[in-house]
Amino acid sequence: MTSRRWLAWALGISSAVLAACQDSLLLPTTSPYSAAALVNGYLTVFPWVGPAVTLPASVGTLGFARYSRHGAALYTAYTYAESERSEIQKVDIRTGRAAKWLAIPGFTAVAGLAISQDESRLVISGRYQGIAGVVCGVFEIEPGRNDAPRLLLREEGCDLNRSWSNPSFSPDSKRAVAWRGRSAIVDLIDLDSGAFKSIGHGEQTTWSPDGKWIAVVDWDSKRYHVLLLDPNDPSRTRNLGTTDGLTLTWSPDSQYLLLWNAEFRCMSFGYWGSLEVADVQSGQRAVIGSSRCKVNNSSGGWVSNEAWKVTGARN
């Protein structure tokens, strides 16, 4: 955890009492989706009501994962340095099985990926070793074809700490949003032309399934804040308040954002905390009780109840 994130966590602990006094969201007792996160290499589901449930598939300890918008799959990227290739694995939540979905030869580092809902478009930010040498930037790959990746944006100097991270598709998969490391500039990318423009400042960019908002986590010298940017009018923004980490995932119905929350009771677990739900319309929040002190701050998402309840899950 960087010094900035340690500071955010410490300040989050000091503000926890104030947050507890605010109006809280009444968690729904029925919903087609549940919050989830990677815990010790396993996908763990945290229902609105009841205990946490661990799914049988082990997906390892990864830097990032992407949840499908229909909530039935989880995509993770592995890089094999010795063979200069990467691959994307897909966890089918219905069966609990993890299998290779796509080999991506030439990628020696993957900093982020976005997969369209119908799996017809794939955008990767990372480092690619091709015929012309090493190139860093944002690439598009058409799954099912053996064509070389199409370079959308080139990162000069090939410093992945400065490159685009966490790409996220618009609902129609014609545009993507990503943020540039260190400078934390949010860029909107036209996937046909490769043209891009800055629309704000922040990290952990994610486009809402209904297309109305792009959510980002921004830093104001003291705390992280959750900001909503209008993709069609970037001057129109909403501030949903502070957060303690970099979990930021839309529910499939665009009603909630999943966040990471630091709590006093979790201090003995180091920087582990809980999953918090923010209602986008009202701004109210609530901690999912089954997640208390069990989740780190980077792997939260949403899964379909219909999918995970048919696996051989265990409490």
Image (spheres, helix red, strand yellow):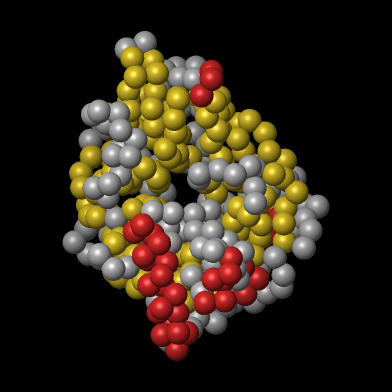
Foreground residue, 10 or 91? 10
Q: Give residue 15's quadrant in the image.
A: bottom left
Quadrant including the N terminus: bottom left
> Is residue 56 visible in the rendered structure shown here?
yes
Foreground residue, 215 or 161? 161
Q: Above or below — where is 298 with respect to 81?
A: below
Q: Is residue 255 left or right of residue 46?
A: left
Q: Is residue 64 left or right of residue 6?
A: right
Foreground residue, 8 or 181? 8
> Is residue 192 visible in the rendered structure shown here?
no
Residue 304, position as x, y percentages in the image: 64, 57
Q: Residue at x 40, y 62 (%)?
A: 6
- What is the tally of numbered marks visible in this picture? 0
Q: Residue at x 24, y 55 (%)?
A: 201
Q: Above or below — where is 187 with respect to 35?
A: above
Quadrant including the C terminus: bottom right
Residue 82, position as x, y percentages in the image: 53, 20
Residue 105, position as x, y percentages in the image: 50, 20
Residue 294, position as x, y percentages in the image: 61, 64
